[in-house]
Amino acid sequence: MLLLGYSLALLASFYLLALVCDRYFVLSLDKISEKLKMNSDMAGATLMAVGSSAPELFVSIIALFKPGQEALGAGTIVGSALFNVLVIIGASAMVRKAFIAWQPIIRDLSFYTLSIILLIISFWDGRITLMEASLFLLLYVIYVFAVMKWKKILPYKDENKDPIDAVEEGLKKESKKKTFIAHFLNGIKYILDFIFPKEKHYWMAFLLSIVFIAGLSWVLVESAVEIAHILNIPAVIIGLTILAAGTSVPDLMSSIIVARQGRGGMAISNAIGSNIFDILIGLGLPWVIVTIGGKIVPVATENLNSSIILLFATVLSVLFFLMAKKWRIGRFAGIGLVSIYILYLTWTILQAI
């Protein structure tokens, strides 16, 4: 009975996180980017990444302050990164064939590769120091600077709309498609619409969204830990699988929407950009917060090293595949990527049994 209760709490939290992120957090970030006069690359690499990766960031922060569960956040980030590369890129390709501008992909894959290398080096001895944590934040600052200057180094043409604008338009169209479940859940949406301020009060919506995301992330961590205890499996395995997939739901929804609009390149760039944010900020920021007082963060590497190596292998595979296909990705490749994730998931679960 307890298992059922925690499982329902987990599912409800996933749904509410996706709802809050898509309907309020991302849209408030859109207004903030307009106010700050940020270009599309800058907004996509920073604000949209923050919007879609906020659940992973808060799960990572909360897990670090829960004694004995420090690796849960790292497991969620690593598992989410695998989900993004294999499932989100795969699903986007299955929805519609895409041609990708190689210039931003080379930029993002290069920084993504550096992020994974930094992750491998930091996990090598099973402990994170302040110096190592600070390098994650420094690399993200360099990445944002590179995004701002990349068009001058390697000129390329933007897709027609800003990432956040495309997602907002897609969400409005998706909301018109009524299903039985959608009608059943409409009550929750009406309640949230009543709680959250109108669009013009976007700063208030932004702050309230953070409160909701933090609270829901706490419920996720608590539920995941209790489920792990009941099933007698390491909590990090729950992070690598259930939490990783669940917290990536906003990314998946956003990417499928823009892929349907014929912007598959945008969907792929968003997935990779979110991974960079997940690793460098989602892990780096919580680690800096904890280690700044001189504390060392332990990492349970026995359940993470193989996933990180697989993550590195998938990056190289995606890069070589795109180069071989002349920067085009279609349905067959999408099915292959999703199949690899299913195999990985099966292998991870069998390890825990």
Image: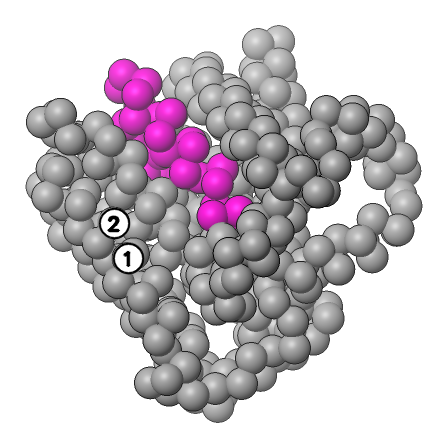
Q: Amino acid at mark 1?
A: Val
Q: Which mark is residue 169?
A: none
Query: How far apart, in angstroms, are the residues tagged by discs 2 and 1?
Result: 6 Å
Q: Main secondary structure of the magenta part?
A: helix
Q: Is residue 143 left or right of residue 183?
A: left
- For the point 53% across and 85% down, the residue is 157
Image side of residue 158 versus residue 168, left or right: left
Residue 334 visible in image: no
Instruction: Provide residue 31's location: percent of width, then percent of height.
Output: 62, 51
The foreground one among 147 and 303 is 147
Question: Callout 2: few (<14), some (14-19), or many (20+) C-alpha neighbours within 10 Å?
Answer: many
Whether 65 is among the magenta residues is: yes
The quarter of the rendered structure image containing the C terminus is top left
Pick the front one: 342 or 148: 148
Percent from the top left, x then y, of residue 175? Answer: 83, 48
- Magenta region: which residues? 50-76
* Extreme-top residue of the structure: 1
User: Which kind of residue does numbered mark 2 sit on?
Assistant: Leu
What is the quadrant of residue 92 in the picture?
bottom right
- The answer to whether the residue labelled 2 contacts the one labelled 1, judged by CB atoms less than 8 Å apart, is yes
Residue at the spot of label 2: 137
Image coordinates of residue 313 in percent, x first then y, are: 32, 65
What residue is shown with label 1?
A: 141
- The answer to whether residue 154 is visible is yes
Q: Residue at x 37, y 84 (%)?
A: 152
At 49% from the left edge and 27% from the top edge, which residue is drawn? 214
Badge 2 marks a residue whose secondary structure is: helix
